Structure formats: structure tokens, C-alpha cells
Image (cartoon, coloured by chain):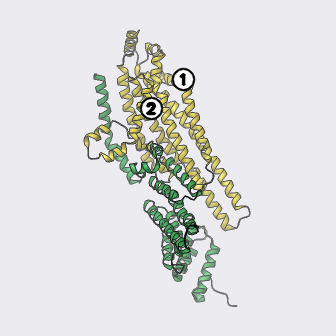
């Protein structure tokens, strides 16, 4: 059985070329399977509940409330997307092996790379759909809060205002609207999505040589934590070339943390976001290539 | 064995190749003043283990907000020193936040200061005044650090001016203290120089100049405000008109040089 499974893809590689169509079909199947998983739904619901309840910061100033909501929602998006990236990707390959479905797929004219890429893209679709759902709710929370604050301001000022107070009211409403409809929040979401994509790629790499689900979840998480600390480590070990070289293998996840800066009103140029995205894409590409190198030679 | 070695070489090789790019992004972050204090053992001690983990996971804003809400709780319980400690940690975590510097200094100068003044444990009234002034000074020092961290916005200059105008101007033997009011005017001038400063900031500058005793400079500034284009600048023109008329009387400006000449009766 094993012998057949190993030989089959080798034969199919000779006969068929790379097909985006097959990759797409595998990706869509992966997405469908993943959506049915309880663990994914659990994380997504937890995320949505946290985001939905973020608007209950009542007794603070308008500025504080908006900041708290944005920090909480972006924090939840960051944590939940990372968890979904890890858990959603960690079980892709082990499940296929455990259920023996991988044998039937690879026995068909499907390249191993197509299979791996399809699985990875399916996982990314799931991730992006989750982030989109959380972002939509985040937007709704901000909109509802903005409308509530404007209503409160109108009530506080009353009607038939003198010119001076009307000007003050308009200025305050403008500030609330500006804080709520902050287009720069898109930049934070882009950076978080890129970070989660990279985490998913690392998890995929780990799952190409490990069949233990626990291992596949814990190791990427530890790499993620190490990656978050890389910036600090790079400062401490600045003079040690060997240590710095060893560090190079771990992506610097701290570079994707720009949500705080956006919430604080700091300037975050699109050029900076582009640089982060390029860095993330290059890292992801390398890791997927490494995953392919292992998976293509793995005995299943 | 060959595959594993190849993978290790690919990962390390490409990681090394990406180092310049990482360094460039890091340098850009430094230039743009992103991030707050590094997570040190002292910081971990101050915020506790759970929050330190959240901090390491990149949730700096959430941790700062949590501590801010906690400090708000200490305020409600009248535990001022704990509140002060939390506010210090919060601004260490997010030194770029105008909100934390502003509200933190307000708590110190207005709420904690007043509580210290009226504390029943004070043996004498003088002790209360001394303690209130100490909190005013803490607020001033706090805001000064805020201005160092966020020098490119009008807000903290304005709040510093307001602190001098309202509180520090009372902290001398015979209030109002002229020196404090003159310092207030300096900060209001700086705040008003930012193009996005609201209209009231611009009005506070001549008002504080007046309190500082420099009526001529105040008159000059009110006139400068008045002669802006009324169709383009949003201002409370009636207030400015009132102030100019008042100063023209107090300075005995000749009728032909007045912005609002007095009609002969």
C-alpha cells in the first residue's frame, strides 16, 4: 500500500503538468472541510463575541472609549487570526494521512506540490474569511459607537444653540467621526493578515514532517513567540554575529505590530506597509518552498 | 538526510539574505518612533506575569488599556499612589499616546491634588497645600515628559499651558503667580502655532498674555486674530471684538488708532 502511494505521485509527476485548477479545487475542498470544524467555529465565535462586547467601555471619555475599542478589536483580530492560522493549518496534513484520504488523492494525477499548495491556500481562504468577518463586525461596532456618541453629544448640548456652542458641537462631532472612521485601520488589518499568513506557512512546514497534532500546534506557537521577541534579541545580541545569524531563521513578527501606532495617531506610511507585506510574502514563499522540499520526498 | 540539510540551508540562507530588509524596517520603525519601552524584568514586575505575556504577544495597546482601566478603578477607590504607579507604567508602554499623558496629568493636578489638599489626615491646612503643590509639580513633570515624547501635536503644549494657567498660577504665596501665567502664555503660543489647533487654543494665548501682565502683547495678538479672513477662519469673532474693545480702553489707545473707535457721544 505504502509502496503504491509513494510510486503513484512520482508517475503522475511525469505525466501531468502543474494545474492551477487542481490547486483551486483542493483549496476549496480544504476550506469547506475547515469551515465544518468545531475548533474553527469556536475560535471565530469567541473572536466575534469579544469584538461585539468591546463597545461596553461606558464611563470614559470619548477619546478613551474609541481607543479602547480599537485596541481591543485589533488585539482580538491578532490573537484569533494567529490561533486560526495555527490550528487550522496544523491538522490539514495529519488529518489527510490519518483518514487515508491522501492516498486516494495522490494516486490520481495530482502533484504533491499542487496538493500542498491547495491545502495551504485553503487554509489562507479560511483565515482571510475569518479576518473579514471580524473586520466587518469591528466596523459595525465602531459605527454604532460613533452614532451613540454623536447622539450623546446632541443630547448634552441641546437644541437652538448659540453660534459658539454650535461650533464646539460640530468640532466634537468631527473628532468623534474622525476617530471612528479611521481609514488607517485597514493598514493594521493588512499587517495582521500578513502575520497570520506567515504563521500558517510555518505551521504547514512543521506539519510536513510531523504527524502529531499537538506538536504541530505547539511548535509554531513557540516559533511565533520567539519571533515576537526577535526585535529585542537583535538589540541585545547586536554584537554577536553568530547569534544574529542563528536568529535569522526565525521571522521577526514584531515588525508586523503597527496596530498600536495607528491607534495612537502616528503616521504609518503605505510604503512601510508595502515593505512589511513584501517581507512577509518573501518569508512565506521560502517556507512554502521548504515545506515542498520535505513533503515531496516524504514517505507517506 | 540530504533533504533536511537542504531545507536548513534554504531557511538559513534566505533568512540571512533577508537580514538587511529586516534591519531597514526596524530602522524605519525607530525613525517613526514606533513601540514603547522594551519588556524588562522591572516592567514585568510592575505589570505582573499575565500582562507581560500579553505584552510579549504584541498586545501592547490592550495591556496599556487594561492598566488604564485599573488605574481608573484606583481613582474611584481613592488609592492615589497605586493610580499614579499605573499611570506611569501606561505611559512607559505607550509613550506616544497623547490621551494617557493628558488625562494622567489631569488626574494628578486636579483630582489627586485636590484630594491631597482636603485629606482629613492632614495635620494642618499648610500640609494640605504643600501636598497639593507636590502633585501639581508631579503633573507638570509628567506633562513635560509627554511633550518630549509627542512634540509634534498641539495637545500637550495646550494642556501644559492650561496647567500653568489654572493650577501652577495658584502655587505661590500671593496668587496669581505672574511667572506661571507667563509660562502658560508661552505654551499656549506654541500650541496655537500648530495649524490643526482648535480656535480656543488661539484665544488662550492673548488671554494668558493679559493675565501675565503684558497687555500690549495681548492687544497685538487679539488684533492679529481679528484681522484674519473672517470668511475662511472659524472663530468666535464676538469674543475677540469684546476683548479688543476692553484692552483699547485699558491701554487708552487713541481713538484714531483703535480697531473699534468710540463714537463721539
Q: Position of residue B121 (x, y in %)?
A: 56, 67
The disc, 1 or 2, on the residue closer to the chain's N-terminal end is 1
Observer-nearest residue: B31 or A20? B31
Q: Which of A13 and B18 is in front in this view?
A: B18
Q: Drawn colour of chain A?
A: yellow
Dot 1, crowdedness within 10 Å: few (<14), some or many (≥20)?
few
Residue B194 circle label = none
Indicate left or right for A152 with B7 as reference. right
Question: Badges 1 and 2: C-beta atoms under 8 Å apart?
Answer: no
Q: Is mark 2 on a helix, strand or loop?
A: helix
Is residue B109 something that shows in the picture? yes
Instruction: Judge whether A22 appears above or below A41 on screen.
Output: above
- Image mark for residue A200: 2
> Mark 1 highlights which residue?
A33
Of the chain colours in the picture, the one used for chain B is green
Residue B99 coordinates in the image, percent (x, y): 53, 57
Which image quadrant: the N terminus of chain B? top left
- Asked which quadrant contains residue A130, the reply is top right
Front-most of residues B112 and B224: B112
Q: How many marks?
A: 2
Q: Which chain carries label 2?
A: A
Query: Looking at the image, can residue A266 be seen?
Result: no
Quadrant hosting residue A138 = top right
Where is A79 relative to B261, above or below? above
**Quarter the C terminus of chain B occupies:** bottom right
**Dot 2, crowdedness within 10 Å: few (<14), some or many (≥20)?**
many
Left or right of A198, for residue A184: right
Amino acid at each position: 500500500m505504502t509502496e503504491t502511494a509513494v510510486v503513484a505521485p512520482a508517475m503522475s509527476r511525469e505525466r501531468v503538468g502543474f494545474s492551477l485548477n487542481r490547486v483551486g479545487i483542493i483549496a476549496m475542498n480544504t476550506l469547506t472541510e475547515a469551515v465544518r470544524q468545531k475548533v474553527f467555529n469556536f475560535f471565530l465565535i469567541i473572536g466575534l463575541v469579544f469584538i461585539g462586547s468591546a463597545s461596553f467601555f461606558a464611563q470614559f471619555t470619548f477619546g478613551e472609549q474609541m481607543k479602547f475599542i480599537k485596541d481591543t478589536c485589533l488585539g482580538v483580530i491578532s490573537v484569533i487570526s494567529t490561533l486560526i492560522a495555527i490550528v487550522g493549518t496544523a491538522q490539514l496534513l495529519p488529518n489527510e494521512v490519518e483518514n487515508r484520504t491522501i492516498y486516494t488523492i495522490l494516486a490520481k494525477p495530482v502533484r504533491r506540490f499542487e496538493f500542498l499548495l491547495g491545502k495551504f491556500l485553503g487554509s489562507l481562504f479560511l483565515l482571510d474569511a475569518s479576518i473579514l468577518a471580524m473586520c466587518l463586525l469591528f466596523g459595525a461596532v465602531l459605527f454604532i459607537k460613533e452614532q451613540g456618541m454623536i447622539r450623546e453629544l446632541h443630547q448634552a448640548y441641546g437644541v437652538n444653540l448659540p453660534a459658539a456652542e454650535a461650533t464646539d458641537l460640530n468640532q466634537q462631532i468631527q473628532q468623534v467621526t474622525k476617530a471612528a472612521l479611521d481609514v488607517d485601520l485597514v493598514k493594521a488589518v493588512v499587517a495582521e493578515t500578513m502575520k497570520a499568513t506567515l504563521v500558517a506557512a510555518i505551521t504547514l512546514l512543521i506539519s510536513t514532517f510531523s504527524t502529531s497534532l499537538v506538536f504541530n500546534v505547539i511548535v509554531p506557537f513557540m516559533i511565533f513567540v520567539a519571533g515576537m521577541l526577535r526585535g529585542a534579541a537583535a538589540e541585545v545580541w547586536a554584537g554577536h554575529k553568530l547569534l544574529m545569524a542563528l536568529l535569522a531563521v526565525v521571522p521577526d513578527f514584531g515588525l508586523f505590530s503597527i496596530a498600536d501606532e495607528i491607534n495612537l495617531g502616528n503616521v504609518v506610511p503605505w510604503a512601510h506597509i508595502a515593505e512589511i507585506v513584501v517581507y512577509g510574502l518573501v518569508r512565506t514563499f521560502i517556507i512554502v518552498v521548504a515545506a515542498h522540499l520535505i513533503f515531496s520526498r516524504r514517505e507517506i | 538526510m540530504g533533504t533536511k540539510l537542504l531545507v536548513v540551508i534554504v531557511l538559513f540562507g534566505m533568512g540571512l539574505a533577508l537580514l538587511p530588509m529586516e534591519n531597514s524596517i526596524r530602522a524605519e520603525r525607530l525613525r517613526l518612533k514606533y513601540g514603547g519601552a522594551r519588556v524588562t524584568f522591572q516592567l514585568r514586575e510592575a505589570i505582573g506575569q499575565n500582562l507581560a505575556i500579553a505584552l510579549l504577544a504584541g498586545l501592547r495597546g490592550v495591556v496599556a488599556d487594561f492598566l488604564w482601566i485599573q488605574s481608573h478603578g484606583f481613582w474611584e477607590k481613592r488609592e492615589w499612589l497605586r493610580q499614579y504607579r499605573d499611570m506611569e507604567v501606561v505611559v512607559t508602554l505607550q509613550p506616544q499616546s497623547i490621551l494617557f499623558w493628558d488625562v494622567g496629568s489631569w488626574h494628578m493636578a486636579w483630582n489627586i491634588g485636590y484630594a491631597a489638599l482636603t485629606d482629613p489626615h492632614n495635620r494642618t491646612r499648610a500640609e494640605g497645600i504643600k501636598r497639593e503643590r507636590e502633585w501639581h509639580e508631579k503633573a507638570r513633570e509628567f506633562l513635560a515628559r509627554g511633550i518630549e515624547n509627542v512634540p509634534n501635536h498641539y495637545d500637550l503644549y495646550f494642556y501644559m499651558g492650561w496647567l500653568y494657567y489654572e493650577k501652577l498660577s495658584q502655587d505661590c504665596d500671593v496668587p496669581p503667580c505672574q511667572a506661571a501665567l507667563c509660562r502658560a502664555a508661552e505654551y499656549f503660543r506654541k500650541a496655537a502655532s500648530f495649524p490643526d489647533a482648535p480656535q480656543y487654543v488661539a484665544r488662550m494665548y492673548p488671554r494668558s498674555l493679559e493675565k501675565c501682565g503684558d497687555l500690549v502683547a495681548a492687544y497685538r495678538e487679539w488684533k492679529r486674530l481679528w484681522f484674519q479672513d473672517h470668511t475662511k477662519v472659524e472663530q468666535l469673532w464676538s469674543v475677540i471684538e469684546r476683548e479688543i474693545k476692553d484692552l483699547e480702553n485699558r491701554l487708552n489707545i487713541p481713538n484714531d488708532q483703535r480697531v473699534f473707535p468710540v463714537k463721539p457721544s
